[in-house]
Every structure is written in C-alpha cells, then in structure tokens.
Amino acid sequence: MNINATLLGQLITFFVFVWFSKKYVWGPIVDTLAERRTQIADGLAAAEKGQAAQAEGEKQAAVIIGDAKVQAGDILGKAEKRGSEIVDEAKANASVEGDRILVAARAEIDTEVSKAKEGLRSQVSELAVAGAQQILKREVDKKAHADLLGDLAAKL
Amino acid sequence: MASEGTLTSSGYIKHHLTNLTFGCTDDGCGIAHSAEEAKEMGFWAIHLDTMFWSIFLGALFLFIFARVAKNIQAGVPGGMQNFVEWIIEFIDENVRGSFTGKNDYVAPLALSIFCWIFLWNFMDLIPVDVIPEFAVRALGIPYMKVVPSTDPNATFGMAIGVFLMVLYYSIKIKGFKGFSAELTMHPFEADNILLKILFLPINFVLETVALIARPISHALRLFGNMYAGEVIFILIALMFSGGFGALFVAGGVLQFVWAVFHILIITLQAFIFMVLTIVYLDMAHQHH
C-alpha cells in the first residue's frame, strides 16, 4: 500500500502502451474498418448500378426484339412473294420448255414418218414390180419402166 | 501463506495484501521480507509484482490486438478479428458519443485503458491463493500480489498519466492564458475589475481543488473497488482454512457468487475509468 517508484514505472509504461496501441493497433484496424465501409458502400452502389443497367438492358432488348419481329415478318412476306414468283417463273419456263420439246418431238416424228414413207415407197415399188412380173410372167425392163414405177411410188 | 510465519487470519490477510517490493534500506538493497521493511524503503522502491503483472497483461493485450491489426483484411473477418473489431467499435462508439473535440489519441487511449484495466481486474477472478502459492513453492518468491489495480501505484500511475494529458491538451488547445482564465475566472464572475481581483484567489483555490480532485477520485475509485473486492475474496478464502465442513461449503458457494458478481464489477470499473478519461479529455478540449 506504499506509494513509491512503482508509480513512475506505471506512468512510463502507460504512455508507451498508449503510443503503441495508437500506432500498431488502433490505426490499422480503424483504417481497415473504414476501408470495409467504403467497400460495402461501393458494392451496394455497384449492385444498384447493375440493377439499373439490367432494367435498361431489358428495355433495349424488348425494343430490339420488337424490331426483329417486324423485320422477320417483312422477310417472311418477301420470301413468300419471291417463292411464288419463282414458282410462277418455273411454271412459265416449264411450259415454254414443254412446248419446245413438243415441237422438237413433232419435227422428229415428221422426219421419221417421211423416212419410213420413203422406205415404204421404194419397197412398194419393188413389190409392185415383182407383182407385175408375176402377173405378166415376163421380164419387165426396170429401166424402160422406171418412169412408170416412179409415178406409182409417188402416188403411194 | 507466509513461509516463515504461523498461519493466523490476520497474518494471512496481511500477506496477501503485501507487494513484492524491491528497494534499499540502511542494511542494503534487496527484496523486502515484511510489510514493515517495505515501508522503510521509502519512495525509491518498486513493486516487482505490480510491474510484472501490469506489463505482462498490457503486453498480452497489445500482442493480441497488434497481431490482428497486422493480418487484418477488409474482407470477411475471421473469429479473432471479429472479436477485436467488436471491441474497437464499442470503444469508438463511446469516444464518438462523449468526445466532441478532434484528437486521434483519445480513442486508442480509451482502448488501451479499457482493455488494460479489464485484464488487471480479471486477475481478481483467479482464486487468491493460486498464483501466490505457486510463487512461494515453485519459485521461492515470498510475496505476490497479482491484481495490479489493487495497488494504488498502478491506478494512480494511470490516473496521473491521464491528468498529464488533460493538462497538456488544456494548455495546447486553450493556450496558457485560456487555461489560467479557466482556473481563476470561475465560478465567481464579475464585471467590476476590483471584484475580479478579489474573486481571483477564491476562484483559483476552488478550481485547483476541483482539478486536483479529478485524478485522485479517478484513481481511488478503481483502486477502492478492486481492493475491497480482493479483500472480500481473501476473507472468503479464509473460510477454507478450517478444513472440510459447513464453513468450507459456504465458502465455496460465496466464492462462486462473489466471482460472478465480480465479473460485472471488473468490466464496469474498466468502463467507468475509460469513460471518465474521455470526459476529462473532452473538457480539456472545450473552449469557454
């Protein structure tokens, strides 16, 4: 219970401890708490910003989707129109082509027919001559009667 | 229990209330072997137990807190960091509430005072005989008073430290003139020059007494509370000396009840000391 030099020792210790706690304890911890406070505030602000951006984005997306729908409708209409045009064109082309093929086929048929007629004519003339020989039982001079036979063949 | 003395109640109590004192007498220097010898050593003696425990506890507090402060991160705090931050914010709130001036030293000062005194007082909850008995039997140290706040040197050391800061900031903030005016122009005021001069010594005496009373009451409040608590613990501990019986059981119950009550006291005393420190420093920072 005596007051003695312990008092001075305590006094000095006290000031050293206060200095130490200011420098190495209070300062860094309070700074960090302040830093965390700003971090949280920043985070909240960023979240708010993000929400606003999202709302804005949704709005923009709706506009873009609307535009896209209109465009898609346009494109669909155009495509349908173009399609029917192509079909019409194809139809026209096909009928022209058909006509052409028909004409060509007819021409070919005509030539075939005339060729066949030619063949038949020569064979008929020979048959006629042979028939006449048989009937006349004599030699018919092919040369002397060529004109006659030619006429006959032409009549067939 | 005194290694050389017989076991009497008064001897037991006296032994528990004697510090391990190092100092010099006419016979030479060394550790005092009795309270009388310690008294004889006069002012230039030192209580080794008070110094050791107070520095040990203060260093423990600073070590824990500084380690947390060193590894602190602004992200999600861990367990110890959480605890430290909780205390820091509690102190910060109190300082903000009571201190209106601007001084970066007040908050760390309050923190050191609160934690340091709390740890001092906490030593009171360790059963009174544990550490002294260990000191006698294992280390051969005759006296060991483990609660620094039951040594007026410790409480006065701290209160005077605060008082010096109050004086320093009073003069720094208000100027020597302002501080002198504060001491001499209150509480009796007058416009008349003659009356002013007449009131000057009266005011000075009143204000000086009020000023000096502050650190004394500051220190004695803590010391008185802790000393009384310690004495009651010692008295309860005396009940165990009669061997196992009704008194022994009663002592156990009392010890428990008083210890639980003391948890409140030690925290409250640390808190009161801290708040008064803040208030005194706030007064030092105020202009009139």
Image (tube, coloured by chain):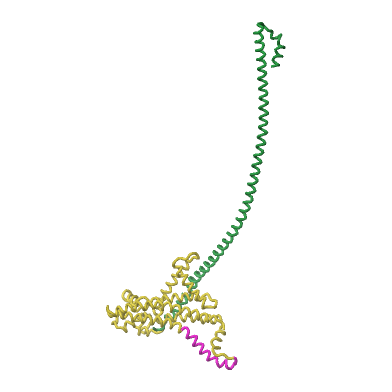
In this image, B137 relative to B150: left or right?
Answer: left
Picture layout, residue A37 above or below residue A87: below
Q: Is residue B193 magenta?
A: yes
Image-quadrant location for residue B35: bottom left
Q: Which chain is yellow?
A: B
Q: Nearer the viewer, residue A102 or A39?
A: A102
Q: Residue at x 60, y 59 (%)?
A: A56
Range shown magenta:
B191-215
Q: Is residue B48 visible?
A: no
Q: Nearer the viewer, residue B178 or B241?
A: B241
Q: Colour of chain A?
A: green
SS majority, magenta: helix
Numbered disc total: 0
Q: Nearer the viewer, residue B279 or A75?
A: A75
Q: Residue at x 55, y 92 (%)?
A: B199
* Furthest residue toward front: A135
State the image coordinates of residue A135 (x, y, percent, origin top left): 65, 8
Q: Quadrant of the N terminus of chain B?
A: bottom left
Q: Nearer the viewer, residue A53 or A86?
A: A86
State the image coordinates of residue A42 (x, y, percent, origin top left): 55, 65
